[in-house]
Image (cartoon, coloured by chain):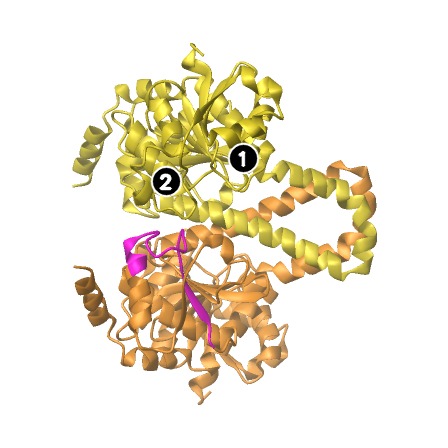
Chain colours: A orange, B yellow
Amino acid sequence: MSDNNLVISVDAMGGDHSPRVVVEGIALAHKENPDMKFLLFGDETKVNDEMKKFPALKDFCTVVHASEYVRNEDKPSQVIRNKNTSMYMAIDAVRKGEARAVISAGNTGALMAISKMILKTIQKIHRPAICTSIPHKNGMCVMLDLGANTECSAVNLAEFAIIGNILAKHTLEINRPRIALLNIGAEEMKGREEIHQAAKMIKNTHLDLNFIGYIEPHQIGEGYADVIVSDGFTGNIALKTMEGTAKLVSGMLKSTIKKSLLAKLGLPFLLPVIWNLKKSMDPRKYNGAMFVGLNGLSVKSHGGTDALGFSYAINNAAKLVRQDFVQTIRNEVEHVDLDELSQDILYDVY
Amino acid sequence: MSDNNLVISVDAMGGDHSPRVVVEGIALAHKENPDMKFLLFGDETKVNDEMKKFPALKDFCTVVHASEYVRNEDKPSQVIRNKNTSMYMAIDAVRKGEARAVISAGNTGALMAISKMILKTIQKIHRPAICTSIPHKNGMCVMLDLGANTECSAVNLAEFAIIGNILAKHTLEINRPRIALLNIGAEEMKGREEIHQAAKMIKNTHLDLNFIGYIEPHQIGEGYADVIVSDGFTGNIALKTMEGTAKLVSGMLKSTIKKSLLAKLGLPFLLPVIWNLKKSMDPRKYNGAMFVGLNGLSVKSHGGTDALGFSYAINNAAKLVRQDFVQTIRNEVEHVDLDELSQDILYDVY
């Protein structure tokens, strides 16, 4: 495994059905990415048992024994310095340069805390962000931050815009992503002060950013923007509201159909449609929240996902690794001094 | 019109199709509330022209001429002191005690600014809030603030909980409303500091509040709470995300059906179901954002609504007027000193 450029490190013990789902997910992802290699950290016996079902895995997977693992109920503060967990070891492999990205379906808080501690933020980036892709009417867009930072300064938001721009280019293959700040109105003076300042900063970075201003939440689904930037509290609220509303609407449709005999008669005609819709909205496709802004990529898979979902998380990470995502961010921010820019803008105000 | 207890003041010139929709809306609302009386402010000639279509209106409506009206594009600061607009006069009628509530389908910002200036906040309440009712799986719940305050202190949030409790009792007829603070996690330490402090304050008010802790956005649709409390920025984000997602999901369903011949064949069976669902989700039913916490009730109807929508806003306001909503809030907060409570809690922390 001399070429570490295409190695992904995996916490084989994370998630509800590990290591089975993890190993099956790797087997699936390998079909899409036959040149990728994997470092699996976990209970050697259990992992090797699962690997036996896929003999081909031996050629591109290396299993490293970890004597412990992080449980879902563990507090990040309890496990952050335990170097013997599969999660810690998997992240540390990225720091050592043995892998370019790490994936875990385990404890979110712990993954974030350990990733931050071990990998550290890229120079000139103040805060990492959690990011994901979501569907809209005509395609997909990138949203960040989704919960790493409950409060954000204008500088943080501007950095997320820069990172989000690269993410949308690399994962969604959008040439000039339209970047927008999530806000409660389109007018310049609506919403919070840090958002107004971030808008000024993004305009003034002299980077080639396609900044389109503010976006209101109901416009996300219309596909008005490719990158939606917000603090982690607001982003998390928006994302969970989407999940809840989608569930509410489809649940209401279902229960109304159940009550009507006529509708039940029509159902066979509609099943393929519902199946198609379910497929296009399948949350497994969007699996893999990226923890970006660090010296290495850390990816959180949904804990309850299946092998297909886990393979999507791997494939998304693989895309970023191939395009040297972390180095691209480093290059982009090298010549931007957001702190200075933020001072300039404050002087503007007073 | 000696009994001002059941008088509602109406800005007859607000909204996209005024005064027609306003007058038709009053005519509809009167069927539900035959004892209510109305003060209509606006261009006398135009309003009287519309009134002619409903001769019975004469008996319970009084038209007061207003020479000007607030336009949608007017900035609140431009119109706030113009005493000749139909909006100003309609609000002022509440201050004078001629009416108990005011309704306008006009410029939201202006309505809020003028209402705040003229009616002033109830003693001991620091900030008014915008509030509405939304549907969930098993019924309805009250949400506030939806945009009056982009940032809120713990005291503000605790006040909204108290107001929301009364609103849910009076409008939704829920005996002991379950009150929850909107947050990004259920654990005590998740989210923002002011939310944690507000939680402590609500628990310590010694009011008979059924406080159930934090609610995450995806739980709103599940019907976990009857009163959802948040700052105006977060509430507005959540509400607009709901609107957008509901539209996205139904749009996707429609376009998928359109693409499938089979599905089109099944459509006639489903039309009644879709019609029922549309009816139960009909935004006109939830029309009327209440501006609460002031000495008088100010209600904003959607600008583009029709007569039925406008009548729902009137009926919702009428419910609150009948139950002496404003006085109930006054009584409830009379013996609660939230400022002191907030100090106590701060001392707790340090």
**Front residue of B94 and A73:** B94
Expressed as whole percent of the image width and height from the top left, the position of residue B182 reads: 40, 42
- Chain letter for mark 2, please: B
Expressed as whole percent of the image width and height from the top left, the position of residue B92 reads: 34, 26
Establish whether labels 2 and 1 are both on one chain. yes
Residue at the bottom extreme of this rendering: A2
Q: Which mark is residue B110?
A: 2
- Residue at 38 percent across and 76 percent down: it is A94
User: Of the residues shown, which amino acid type is indicated by label 2?
Assistant: Ala
| Residue B245 to residue B124: above or below | below
Q: Which span is picked out in magenta?
A: A176-196
Local SS, label 2: helix
Could you tell me which quadrant the C terminus of chain B lies in? top left
Expressed as whole percent of the image width and height from the top left, the position of residue A310 reads: 55, 66
Magenta includes A330?
A: no
- Chain letter for mark 1, please: B
Q: Which mark is residue B286?
A: 1
- Is residue B146 at least partly visible in the picture? no
**Front residue of B103 and B222:** B103
**Front residue of B68 and A316:** B68
| Residue A5 to residue B243: above or below | below
User: Neighbour class for label 1 at 10 Å: few (<14), some, many (≥20)?
Assistant: some
| Residue A28 to residue B46: above or below | below
